[in-house]
Amino acid sequence: MVLSIFLSFSVKADNSISLEEGTKPLLIGHNLHYWVDRSGILDFDNARQKWSTGAFEKGNSEVINLGVDLSTSYWFHANLTYSPSQGPQPSWKLIFDHDTADAVSLFLVGKNGAVKKTSVDTSRPFYNRENTALVPVLNIPLNEAGDYDIFIHVEASGPAIFPFMISKESDLIRSTSIEYAFLCVYYGALLAMIFFNLFVYIGTKSKAYLYYVIYVTNVGVFLGFVKGLGLAFLIPNMGELNRFFINASGMLMFVATVTFIRAFLCTRERTPSLDKFLFWLPIAVLAFIPFAGTKAGAICLVIVSPVTIIFILTASIKVLRQGHSAAKLFLLGWSSLIVAICYQAFAYIGILPWSVFTGYAIHIGSLVEVVLIALALAEKINTYKLEKDNAELESKQRLIEKNEALNETDRLKNEFIATISHELRTPLNGIVGSIEIAKITPSECGGHLDNALMSSRNLKDIIDDILLLSEILSGETVVIRKQFSMSEIIDQVIKDGKIVASTKNIIIRVNLENIPKYKVIGDPYKIAKSLGHILSNAIKFSTEGSPVHLDIRVDELTVGNLRLHINIKDDGIGIDANKLGALFEAFNQADNSYRRSYGGLGIGLTLAHGIATLMGGSIDIDSEKGVGTSVKLEFLLEKPQASNGDSQATDNRFLSRVDSVLVVEDNIVNQHVLVSILKKSIGNVDSVYNGENAVEKCIDTKYDLIFMDCQMPVMDGFEATRKIRSIDNINSETPIIAVTANATEIDRKHCHDVGMNDFVKKPISRDIIENIINEYRLS
């Protein structure tokens, strides 16, 4: 590469090399004949004999290129005519301008047959050479004019490329100076790219920058060994390892290249099939590093290079088509390196002429590639930062929206808490006030106690609604499947609604269709809750004297499946269409000022929506401001297989009579209330204060029913029930009724799991207890 600094060369058309005072540096490939020593053991005398027998072949290009060849020994011959001028004679040099030579020997045969030999062995210490150039340079010992035979022997372990040049020492010194200047610029640029991108990596922690720094470093090391810089400055006394370091650094460069490309192009996500090859390729290359100092290592490098380039180009094009903007610069950078490699290869085989750019084509191409890839990497990081900034802006916007939503929720909750406080204090005031007045005026206590009872029921309904809402919002609601009378549920809700409607002179117009006379299976409590809230809202928001329409229909879908349709329509104030979507949100009303005007917690529609969803139904609202509202509810029910329109199957839990009852309650007041209610209809009522006492009683005394509190000291109701059911006693089959303040569906399920037969929520009433007793007594 040294003499490629010159733009033109002297090449003679015939086989003889002519050296004169004005001869410029010249490539002598056309002047050479070559012979490949397949055995690798022949010496100079053998080579002369082969020449004399016509075994040598004629070179046909400026640079003899035999491609990938397994041989390691090559002989060349040329005729040389030396015609010096008068005066001091220049020193002539033979230059082997390639990295493939391990040793080069020159044999100069004069007129009298005398042989002069000069040689360069790269395995010897670098600074012991006669000419300390980066490539093998040999002295041509020409002392007088005349014709000479030149034999050149090359021991090579790389590709069979032989760029021989002859130059005067003065021209070699000038070209070497220019070469060193170029290499300083080249490596200065590489170092600048390495340190700049290393600092960027330290700042960004992006692995792509780290892989880029490793890749550029490997490019510089590999080309340094190829140019002889490694041998000259790194291992000057270990020349025997030079070939190993050239091929090993090349292999490591390919590993670093593929690793960087996989990270930069994200091939694992974008081109999975190609990524598999790019994953295994470096592993395969690394396996050849122990053989880097051999011909096999060099051949591996020659084969891997084009294969890797093809796959890199394919991956780049695929990623570019997927919209990876930085892949444009990446592809352009690799294209510049490929053009440089192709240019140098075509010059070696004679397709393109040798020029000033030939020896440095790969350096120039690699420098352009390194710069363009750095720009591509910067563009990728900028794109990433832009996407990150946009994502942060979107995230901040979402956070602002969530904060606003949370603030609105907090505001609604605060309003809800204030409303709860009002709604709870109102019936409490009725209870406390009515009882106090009843104590003062015993003669009028009947009416005051009725008011206290009505207020207590209102308070109970409010608490039940809050607990049910908590279950729905937490996802812990359980749908109970039990038989019930559809007519009884409807009648009770209508009865309660008419009481409220009468205060506003509102008539409830009821239309019932296909209501089954037999019992159906479903959750009567939740259906009644939903229907009651919707009917209550219709009455609440209707103007005085206007009617409320209630249409209920039951359709049979398939065998055993029923659908309950409920449509409640009023001619009240109506709702704005843009506020309908928020009606099912907890703590919300279309206008929260309604709470002040109409009262209520604002959770009725939330409860109805949650219950309908749980029971496989739906709720739909159609409303117009100032015209009225129509609410449609649907629930899925089941038809008992053993039921018909005229008869009921007898439950084996029913008793012929209920004469003896046990009450298990730790609270004195609650125990007294329950015992007093039971004694109105039951002859024998026993009571105990904890579960342990209950178990002892059950061993000695037979009871028809047991009313069991759940939370008690010493032994709770759950443990007591498990013991009664598990130990041998006369009450192991006695129905046990849970009486508890824990009113959630999970509590109900827990009671059922331990063996309790039924579930009653506190506060209890005489009607509730009598219904329980009647349910377990045969009529």
Image (cartoon, rainbow, N blue to C red):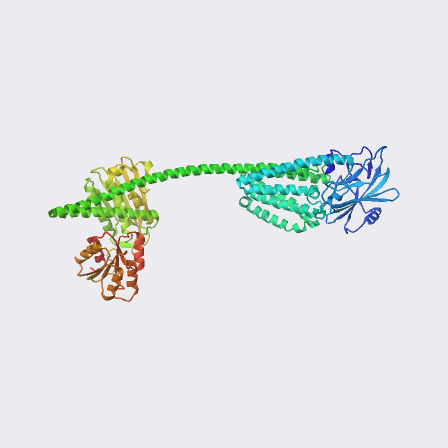
State whether residue 663 is above or below residue 122: below
Q: Quadrant of the N terminus?
A: top right
The picture quadrant where one finds residue 131 is: top right
Specify whether residue 317 is in view: yes
Residue 676 position in % (x across, y down) = 18, 56
In the picture, measured across the screen, residue 570 lies left or right of residue 303, that is left
> 378 or 196: nearer the eye?
196
Q: Is residue 264 visible?
A: no
* Residue lying furthest right: 112
In which quadrant will I find the C terminus? bottom left
Pinpoint residue 633: horizontal percent, then vertical percent. 30, 45
Residue farthest along the left direction in this orientation: 443
The structure residue drawn at horizontal position 59% and vertical position 38%, both measured from the top left corner, is: 195
Nearer-the-camera pick, 193 or 126? 126
| Residue 329 image position (x, y, % from top left) | 58, 37
Numbered-mark total:
0
Q: Position of residue 671 (x, y in %)?
A: 21, 56
Which residue occupies the foreground of this view, 240 or 522?
A: 240
**327 on left or right of 293:** left
In the picture, residue 346 is in which quadrant? top right
Q: Quadrant of residue 90?
A: top right
